[in-house]
Image (cartoon, grey):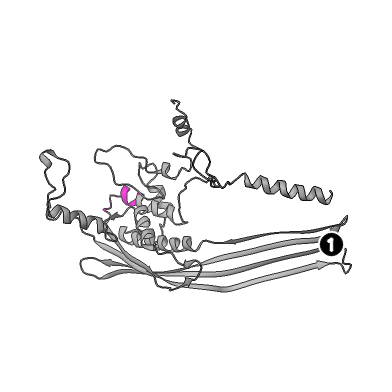
Amino acid sequence: MTKRARILAAVAGALALTGCITPYAQSNGLYTSPIGNAPVTANPTPYSAALVCMADYARSSGITAPRIAVGRVLDYTGKYDIEGGRQITQGASLMAISAFAKAGARQVERFDTSVGELELKYANNKLISDGKENNEFRQILAGSIPGSDYYFVGGITELNSNIRSIGADAFVGDLDPADAKGRAGFKLFVINVGVDLRLVDTRTLEVVDVISYQKQIIGRELSAGIFDFANGNVFDVGAGERAMEPIQLAVRSTIERAVLEMTANLYGVQNSEPCGGLAEDSKGLMTAQSVTGKAVTRTDGAMTSDASVRTDPNRFNANRDGGIKAALRGRKN
């Protein structure tokens, strides 16, 4: 290929790329279309299935689940990245709420009561109507808000970077400068996170359960390349991979494991029956439980789309759900 042909090829490639984005809005009102079409999926940990088993066991055994309130589960590590901000999630309390929902616990809101308190204030001033006849204002009834039996609090207390790392690099080539040269390398490193969590009796403030867990997180980096001269051309080709286990998923896993052990204690489950026996005992049970949590049972008893359908990545997705496609195109099923 001549020099002119190479220049023309490079220019053509650059112009082709400009077709993905324009300085003027297109007919759909956008400069470009975003990439990526992965559907929404469930976000379980290795302990989510056991939490669901625990809920099924309690329901099939007639165990009345206690009311749980989740308080503040804060990041006490103090680790902060100038470019990326806080290294540890600030949503550990929300993870705990989801975990207790998977375990079948009844929950009362204590983490963010701002809306409830505002509604109560408006109702106290007779400003809120429930849509009844004659604009009847909402009544404030004593004892209408259920209390909690226990509340769950704690914090993320450890983030230890680079507990241990290992790596190797190799370069192989002939002494002749014109011969091929190759290189390869790999690195492994390990960090960990730790949590300290507790369950407190709401009435007596007695700490009834304390759990401390840690989880190690691994990362790896692989690289390889080759350098060579051939037919008057220079070839320098490299490839590599970099991957790290998600830190925030590790935090979620430690919280779910702690919630699993605490609910097992509340339900009176023996240590020898962590999940397998529970799943067998509750086989065939019609349940609204799933690894995404659960919804409150409807008062009319109607079935809701709460269990396995919540984890279906194709459901309601315009590009994957056939029913949605037909509706979007104006056709009837």
Q: Is residue 101 above or below residue 131?
A: below
Residue at 67 percent across and 45 percent down: it is: 16
The residues colored magenta run: 56-64
Residue where numbered disc 1 is placed: 180
* Residue 119 pos. (x, y %): 20, 53
Query: Does residue 240 appear left or right of residue 209 in this picture?
Result: right
Quarter of image, res 153: bottom left
Among the 4 quarters of the image, the one containing residue 328: top left
Task: Classify residue 14 as left or right of residue 297.
Answer: right
Magenta-drawn stretch contains 34: no
Q: Is residue 270 visible?
A: no
Percent x, y of residue 90: 40, 64
Identify which residue is drawn at 72% across, 62% down.
224
The image position of residue 207, as x and y in percent, is 28, 70
Q: In the rendered image, which quarter contains the C terminus?
A: top left
SS at badge 1: loop
